[in-house]
Amino acid sequence: MTRRKNTIRNVALAAAVSLLAIGSAQAADCKIGISMKTLDAPYFAAQEVAAKKHAEELGCEVITADAQNDLNKQIADIEDMVAQGIGALIVNPRDSKGMVPAVNAASAAGVKVFVIDSTLDPAANFVTLVQSSNSRNGMLVGQWLADQTKGKDLKIALLSGDKGNEVGQERRLGVLAGLLEGQLRNEGRARVEIVGQGWGLWGHEGGLKAMEDLLVANPDINVVLGENDSMVLGAKKALEQAGRLDGVLLVAAADGQKEALAMIKEGGYGATGLNDPALVASTAVDLAKKALDGDLPADTPKITYTTPVAIIKGNVDQYYKPDAVF
């Protein structure tokens, strides 16, 4: 009887060891590097958390690195990941042009490279860029704004991120195109005035300061349009402090930050475009896994867009997650 028990125990142990070996082999077959340009912002932190979690759910080994907004560090991070044998790289690049040599070197080493959120110069050899459509989200937000303000002359304070930023340009032009088209459709004419453009550097404090400056010369602002939610939330604080919030409609071209969504639910914020960091990150991970498994279609487009949405009071409950990182 003792011999039989030992035999059963040994068989069970061998089976467990075999399962562990299979798991290790699967992890080795799916080893993904995640290189973030920074984690010093809720949006990017949420992106990294979602990418890592989803990759591990798919049975992949994951290596992550925070470049801390340092181009040279991000290049070194990627070189280190390639040396550790990653099969796929998900990268949110610090610099569109500066990252090209590192990405091309990784691709030359056989790594499947997927870019998320930020654009990368076309000279880089990557599989696809996964992001929300800044222009299509903007168009939807702009069309909503036109519908909400029929018959009004709009005096818009525009809050932009930083000068020369391609993402910011796509976002504001998308909203303005949707707004003009919506006014033409609704009224047969367009009445829009940008009373001033402030540079909020994508943040709450920057949006507050830019709004304070714009209010000095423009007492008749009735719309605040920001290229992301964070700047608009800062602008709201400036308007409150100046006693000027009443009658001002707050809209953002993109992001869907949970604080903004909470305000949309309450009616204190108009609309924002869906730029869900978790959705962008998990979509990239799915594509990377398919590439490693040999299942990614050869005609995968160079840009993969998530579905565009204007988040408004009527649909905000579908997207608002109070416990979300972002």
Image (cartoon, rainbow, N blue to C red):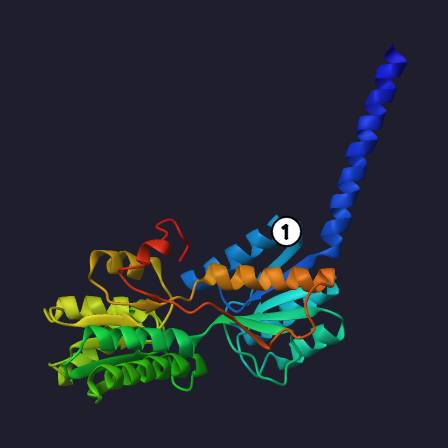
Give the amino acid type for the residue marked by disc 1 in the picture.
Answer: Leu
Which residue is label 1 attached to?
Answer: 58
Where is residue 7? Give x, y as percent: 87, 21
Q: Please tell me which residue lies in front, 132 or 63.
A: 132
Q: Nearer the viewer, residue 83 or 107?
A: 107
Relative placement, left or right, of 112 versus 130 is right
- Answer yes or no: is residue 231 visible: yes
Residue drawn at x 43%, y 83% as measured from the top left: 165
* Quarter of the figure that contains the C terminus: bottom left
In the image, is residue 192 above or below residue 229? below
Residue 189 placed where, x, y %? 21, 89
Can you name the residue that lies furthest to the bottom here? 189
Label 1 crowd (10 A; few <14 / some 14-19 / many >=20): some
Residue nearest the viewer, comparing 118 with 320? 320
> Residue at the spot x=86%, y=18% of the render?
6
The number of numbered discs placed on residues in the rendered structure image is 1
The furthest residue to the top:
1
When the figure is inspected, residue 99 is found, relative to residue 275, above or below; the finding is below
Position of residue 302 in the picture relative to residue 31 (left or right)? left
Please state the horizontal and vertical placement of residue 3, each as a whole percent of the image: 90, 14
Q: Is residue 316 above or below residue 17?
A: below
Residue 244 sits in quarter = bottom left
Figure quadrant of residue 270: bottom left
User: What residue is rendered at 43% in x and 79% in y?
Assistant: 167
Disc 1 on helix, strand or loop? loop
Query: Which residue is located at x 56 percent, y 51 percent?
Result: 53
> Does residue 201 show up?
no
Whether 310 is drawn above or below 12: the answer is: below
Q: Quadrant of the N terminus?
A: top right
